[in-house]
Structure formats: C-alpha cells, structure tokens
C-alpha cells in the first residue's frame, strides 16, 4: 500500500521537506538534496534574486521537474508583508503553494500568532495553498485549520536551534486537533535524525528542516540520515509501538517453558 502525503491538491511519497538556505555552496546543496530524496524544496522569496542573471541560485542547478517548490514568506513581520511576498512568488510562476511565516520577535524568531492567522485567512481567500508555520499552540492550530490552511507547521523548537522537540506533549494536542483535516508538518528546531524520527513516531505527517542538514559537518550524509529517520519514524508510527510497562515482561513466558 502506498503511503502518500497529501497537501491540498498535491501528493508526495517523501515525507521530508527540505529547506535550501545556509549551504556552503551550490554543489553541496545539490548533492544533499539528491541524498534526501525530498520532493518539496522550500526557500525564502526575499533571498532569491530572480531578476539578476549574474547571481547564481539553486533553481539553476536542479532538475525542477523532480520537485515541487514551496516559497516561504521568511522575513515578514506583518500579515500584509507576508501577503505581498506570497503574491510575488505566485506572479513569478513558482507555485501556488506558499509557506506562511510572520515573525513576531526577531530575537527568538517566534511567530506572531495574530499576524500568522490573518495572513493565512487573506491568502486562502486569494486561492493559495497555504502551509502555515506556527508555534506549538493547539488552539492556534485549530484556528488555522478553520481559516483554511492546507497544513499546520508547528515548530519543534526555535528556528535553527537544533534543540529537537521541546514540547512533544503539546504536539500530540495539535495532532489531535488536525487529525483527519490537514497534515501536521513539524518545522524548525530539528537537530538530528532521532528528532525527526521522534516527531514522525508521535504521528506527524512530515518534517521540514534545513539547518540540521546544511550546518552538519557532512551535509550530504546528514541528508540521507534525515531521510531514513523520517522513514523509520513513520513506519514505527504505522506499526504501532508496544505499551510501556513499569515492570519486566519476559520475552519467553515462564508458563511456556518445557520441564
């Protein structure tokens, strides 16, 4: 049975979404993307100079027929600014799918909940497939689903921190809020394949990461490791883990021993 990730009208076989920033050079970036086997690449529209042919960018190095591009509104600090960036991405013909980020605090890079919800509502009305980056607030996740977000993307921990899942308990609440409605994609703060596996084993539908790969000592090997971590976590979730017990439970029960 094929286990597909569905976001709006899009379907994917990979559940690892990869950011394209922070790589030391385009060759390493390209090899890491290949190793990850991702099908979705996200990038900041404001950091991509599409009008300057002398400024090389990753779009020129990859076979874009293999990927769905996910522009994001990184750098936006108001809903209106996020909407303008999304419109620019759409006008460039990149994709009608957009990752909404409205940052409320530049030190922690935590999202502005009010601006995030407002931008989501505005872009949904304009026909965008909106994937919304948010905090680990279950009630905000509910409001985003009601606003028409195609996916909710709670942060595991602050962007680029590598701290992993700081609040897995609240993540389970978000998963309950979104169950059967939209996918939950854990975004930001993933530091290792174990973090990715943990998120997937809790029931997340996908993981989006960038720094953990781009900043690794060997980005290409880490990209492959993240792919396997996501896959292992997903399979573990679907398989259903055993219940935790306080005491030992022999793998060879005493009553089955032959005297």
Image (spheres, grey):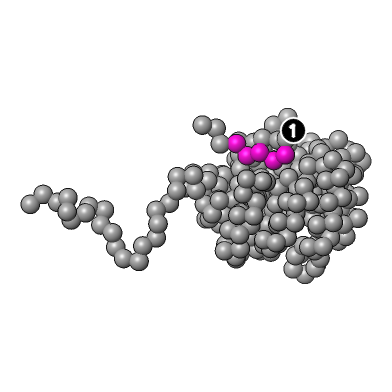
* Horizontal side, residue 139 vs residue 54: left or right: left
Does the segment drawn in magenta span residue 101? no
Q: Which residue is mark 1?
A: 64
Residue located farthest toward the bottom when viewing the structure as drawn: 107
* Horizontal side, residue 67 vs residue 75: left or right: left
In the image, residue 192 lies at what x, y percent? 56, 56
**Can residue 125 be seen in the rendering of this structure?**
yes
Does the segment drawn in magenta span residue 5? yes
What range of the chain is rendered magenta? 4-8
* Horizontal side, residue 219 vs residue 77: left or right: left
Is the stretch drawn in magenta largely helix, strand or loop?
strand
Please, is residue 257 above or below residue 138 in the view?
above
Q: Work out whether residue 18 or residue 249 is closer to the camera in this orientation and state it.
A: 249
In the image, residue 164 lies at what x, y percent? 59, 61
**Quadrant in the picture for residue 165:** bottom right
**Quadrant in the picture for residue 88:** top right
Secondary structure of the residue carrying numbered label 1: helix
Q: Work out whether residue 65 or residue 259 is closer to the camera in this orientation and state it.
A: 259
In the image, residue 233 lies at what x, y percent? 51, 49
Identity of the residue drawn at 81% across and 39% down: 96
Identity of the residue drawn at 71% across and 47% down: 151
Identity of the residue drawn at 87% across and 57% down: 79
In the image, residue 35 lies at what x, y percent? 60, 40
């Amino acid at each position: 049975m094929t286990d597909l990730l569905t976001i709006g009208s899009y379907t994917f076989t990979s559940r690892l979404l990869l950011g394209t920033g922070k790589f030391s050079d385009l060759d390493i970036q390209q090899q890491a993307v290949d190793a990850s086997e991702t099908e979705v690449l996200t990038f900041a529209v404001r950091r991509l100079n599409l009008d300057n042919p002398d400024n090389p960018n990753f779009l020129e190095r990859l076979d874009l027929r293999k990927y769905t591009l996910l522009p994001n509104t990184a750098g936006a600090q108001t809903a209106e600014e996020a909407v303008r960036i999304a419109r620019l991405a759409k006008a460039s013909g990149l994709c009608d799918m957009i990752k909404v980020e409205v940052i409320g605090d530049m030190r922690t890079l935590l999202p502005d909940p009010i601006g995030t919800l407002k931008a989501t509502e505005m872009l949904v009305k304009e026909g965008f497939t909106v994937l919304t980056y948010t905090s680990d607030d279950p009630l905000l996740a509910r409001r985003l689903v009601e606003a028409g977000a195609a996916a909710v993307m709670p942060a595991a921990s602050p962007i680029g921190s590598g701290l992993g899942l700081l609040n897995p308990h609240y993540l389970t609440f978000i998963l309950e809020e979104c169950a059967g409605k939209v996918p939950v994609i854990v975004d930001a703060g993933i530091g290792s394949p174990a973090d990715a596996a943990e998120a997937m084993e809790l029931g997340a539908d996908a993981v989006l990461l960038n720094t953990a790969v781009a900043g690794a000592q060997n980005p290409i090997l880490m990209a492959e490791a993240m792919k396997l971590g996501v896959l292992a976590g997903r399979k573990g979730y679907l398989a259903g883990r055993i219940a935790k017990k306080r005491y030992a439970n022999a793998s060879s029960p005493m009553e089955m021993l032959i005297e």
